[in-house]
Image: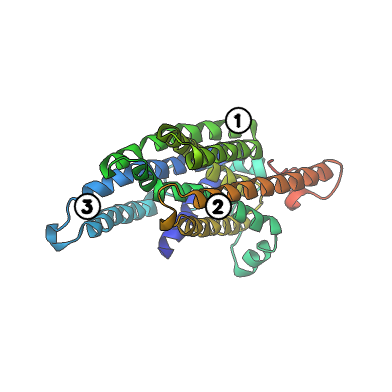
């Protein structure tokens, strides 16, 4: 599991170093869409693999780990050959195309060429309090996402549907979430704004959580799950882009991504502990704990946005350059 967390860091880091600010949410959301599809249809795949129970002397859960694990390992090995670690080292672009990519990134944020990542540089970057705030924000954004992926079928079963039907009904919310995440990514990149669209998705998530917790109608509770999925799908990519867009240098961006994604793992653990078995089938305490995380996310989003606005304003009026880079501005 620890190695998988490292893979998540790498998958989150590669899109943001190769993209300008105007395309960063697109890139991260594209990666997240793959995760959404996996989350939406993995219960169905898991159910099918569980039917192999006893085959080859293996239990059903063993088949799930074996097949899905082999797919992950195979794709990981392929990534070694096809995914470049930095823009200037790739095997699929010409020299002219590589130059254009580096030029676009340099004009956008001035750090197209990677700097050396050392222990001292990482420790220095971690002294920036904003990185830790971004980490807590990502923690909050992953709580509803993890809760949904772990407990959706249980919540649906609590509405009276059979296990098989609950597994089938868990897929449609993720289909809507796919379109929602790409729509918010497109709007965020087009407007070169992050905070307003993150806030909008948080409000959608809160509406879905309250609807799922308290609506007397099973149909409305199911509709609430659609809202939760739609709100959370693009929120985490938005927060990750928000944090990555507002740092300079590859080493600081690497430290930021590692810290932020690490907090996301803690958020996943928190989600699994707040949805307790004794609260089944409505899980009201867990849903309210998730609402609390969303409110905290909004508060921290406001804090960082005000901070970034003030620093940008000072730089525009002749103050010190933002992040020590002339012409660079924080993305709000």
Image quarter in which the C terminus is found: top right
Residue at x 66%, y 51% (from the top left corner): 247
Q: Nearer the viewer, residue 23 or 80?
A: 23
| Residue 73 lies in quadrant | bottom left
Residue linked to disc 2: 289
Viewer-nearest of discs 1 and 2: 2
Q: Using the rendered image of the protein, determine whether residue 227 is visible from the camera's viewpoint.
A: yes
- Indicate the secondary structure of the residue bearing disc 1: helix
Disc assigned to residue 190:
1
Name which of mark 2 and mark 3 comes first in the sequence: 3
- Indicate the secondary structure of the residue bearing disc 2: helix
Name which of mark 3 and mark 1 comes first in the sequence: 3
Q: Using the rendered image of the protein, determine whether residue 112 is visible from the camera's viewpoint.
A: no
- Give me the C-alpha separation between circle 3 and circle 1: 44 Å
- The answer to whether marks 1 and 2 mark residues whose Cβ atoms lie closer than 8 Å is no
- Furthest-right residue in this view: 318
Viewer-nearest of discs 2 and 3: 2
In the image, taking residue 15 as reference, residue 323 lies left or right, namely right
In the image, taking residue 128 as reference, residue 145 lies left or right, namely left
Q: Categorize mark 3 by other alpha carbons within 10 Å: few (<14), some (14-19), many (20+).
A: some
Q: Nearer the viewer, residue 44 or 32?
A: 44
- Indicate the secondary structure of the residue bearing disc 3: helix
Residue linked to disc 3: 50
Residue 314 percent coordinates (x, y): 84, 45
Residue at x 68%, y 49% (from the top left corner): 300
């Amino acid at each position: 599991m620890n190695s998988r967390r490292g893979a998540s860091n790498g998958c989150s880091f590669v899109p943001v170093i190769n993209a300008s600010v105007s395309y960063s949410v697109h890139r991260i959301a594209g990666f997240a869409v793959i995760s959404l599809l996996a989350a939406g249809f993995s219960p169905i795949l898991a159910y099918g693999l569980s039917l192999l129970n006893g085959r080859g002397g293996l239990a059903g859960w063993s088949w799930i780990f074996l097949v899905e694990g082999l797919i992950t390992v195979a794709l990981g090995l392929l990534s070694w050959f096809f995914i470049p670690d930095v823009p200037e080292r790739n095997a699929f672009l010409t020299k002219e195309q590589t130059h254009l990519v580096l030029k676009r990134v340099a004009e956008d944020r001035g750090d197209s060429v990677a700097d050396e990542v050392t222990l001292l540089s990482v420790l220095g970057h971690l002294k920036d309090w904003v990185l830790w705030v971004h980490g807590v924000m990502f923690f909050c954004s992953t709580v509803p996402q993890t809760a949904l992926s772990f407990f959706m079928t249980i919540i649906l079963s609590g509405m009276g549907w059979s296990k098989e039907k609950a597994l089938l009904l868990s897929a449609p919310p993720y289909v809507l979430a796919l379109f929602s995440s790409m729509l918010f990514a497109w709007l965020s990149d087009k407007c070169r704004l992050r905070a307003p669209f993150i806030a909008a998705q948080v409000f959608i998530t809160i509406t879905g959580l309250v609807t799922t917790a308290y609506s007397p109608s099973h149909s409305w509770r199911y509709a609430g799950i659609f809202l939760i999925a739609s709100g959370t799908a693009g929120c985490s990519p938005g927060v990750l882009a928000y944090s990555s867009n507002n740092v300079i240098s590859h080493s600081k961006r690497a430290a930021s991504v590692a810290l932020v994604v690490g907090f996301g793992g803690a958020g996943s653990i928190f989600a699994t502990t707040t949805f307790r078995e004794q609260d089944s089938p409505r899980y009201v305490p867990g849903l309210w704990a998730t609402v609390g995380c969303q409110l905290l996310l909004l508060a921290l989003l406001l804090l960082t946005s005000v901070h970034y606005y003030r620093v940008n304003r000072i730089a525009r009026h002749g103050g010190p350059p933002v992040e020590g880079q002339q012409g660079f501005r924080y993305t709000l």
